[in-house]
Image (cartoon, helix red, strand yellow):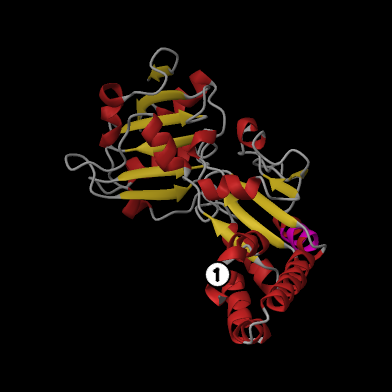
Amino acid sequence: KLAALVEGYREQVKAAFNSVEQRRIFWEDILEGPVAELVFAGKDDEARQRLEQALEKASRKTRAEGEVYLVGAGPGDPDLLTFRALRLMQKADVVVYDRLVSQPIMDLVRRDADKIYVGKERDKHAVQQEDINHCLVRLAQEGKRVLRLKGGDPFIFGRGGEEISTLMEQGVNFQVVPGITAAAGCAAYSGIPLTHRDYAQAVIFVTGHLKDGTVNLNWDMLAHEHQTVVFYMGLHGVHCICEKLIERGRAGSTPVALVEKGTTPDQKVYLGTLDTLPQLVKDNDVKPPTLIIVGEVVELHDKLRWFMLDREVTAHG
């Protein structure tokens, strides 16, 4: 009888608690407490009533505490969202979102959710990161389910670690949902495998925009052959990137691809070399968000490209 009672409320409990840990604690209290004793005493109606009261009380407490969902929205194509991301997008009371979250993805968010834009651009940081962190804490402490929606993956150059550190310090409940990072999405949609037995046995993701505004990286490591290097946020420092790689031994003829607005209907791919890349950016007025892929795997683009064959803009330089 106890098993049947539990089974009858399983879906309600799942809907009331976001985390597996919360559900586990609730069921332990039910199975080891007064509800179980009432069932064993043959008082099924009382047991059911007590379980419903416990569920309502625990559910109210969870709602009052609020929670933050740190969700990766992927590189732009809404079809690349995870099922979990989509479920939480439909559940949130308020959405705090970045510049890199595409409009088609925002269209999938719960319609009556409040929306707060905190996008940043280079040298145009309208909202400081610390303010974003405190905003998440404040909203959660108001009892709201807060969707922190970030382009790509929140833990790959997404400052997700900084945000959940603040949540942890303030005792705010949170969960993290990974997303497809821009390097994986843009490379796949450009027909450029990041690793390949004949070309690259390693891949490195690098940010071209450090916290202090410099491009101070381990250039000796990045200049190694037989690897692919992907630069995020590298357009502003493209001259420095090419100069440093060539200076540390990478051939000026090394193939390079720029993927602008990857995985979206506006995707553009520009092909060149370390020697020609700066001029390629200038001639085509390339704009963010753009990913820079450096390595011999870029040569496979013309052969393996599949996305938007009739409309994709591909320029060579």
Residue that appears at 71% across and 50% down: 92
Q: Which residue is mark 1?
A: 4
State whether the magenta stretch is mostly helix, strand or loop.
Answer: helix
Residue 243, horizontal then vertical, whole percent: 40, 39
**Is 279 included in the stretch rendered in magenta?**
no
Q: Residue at x 24, y 44 (%)?
A: 200
Q: Secondary structure at mark 1?
A: helix
Residue 245, x across and y down, in percent: 35, 43
Q: How far across and how far down the image is residue 131, in percent?
A: 76, 57
Vertical arrangement, residue 107 with respect to residue 29, above or below: above
* Residue under the image location 27 percent in, 35 percent down: 297
Quadrant in the picture for residue 253: top left
Measured as percent of width and height from the top left, residue 233 is found at 53, 41
Above or below 21: residue 92: above
Residue at the extreme front of the image, as rendered: 42
**Figure check: 260 above or below 89:** above
* Residue 212 in sight in this render: no
Q: Describe residue 72's horizontal placement relative to residue 42 as left or right.
A: left
Name the one closer to the observer, 268 or 94.
Answer: 94
Residue furthest toward the top? 310
Q: Residue furthest left?
A: 198
One can see residue 90 in this view: yes
Q: Nearer the viewer, residue 65 or 289?
A: 65
Residue 138 in magenta?
Answer: yes
Q: What residue span does the magenta drawing correspond to?
A: 133-139
Above or below — where is 73 with respect to 20?
above
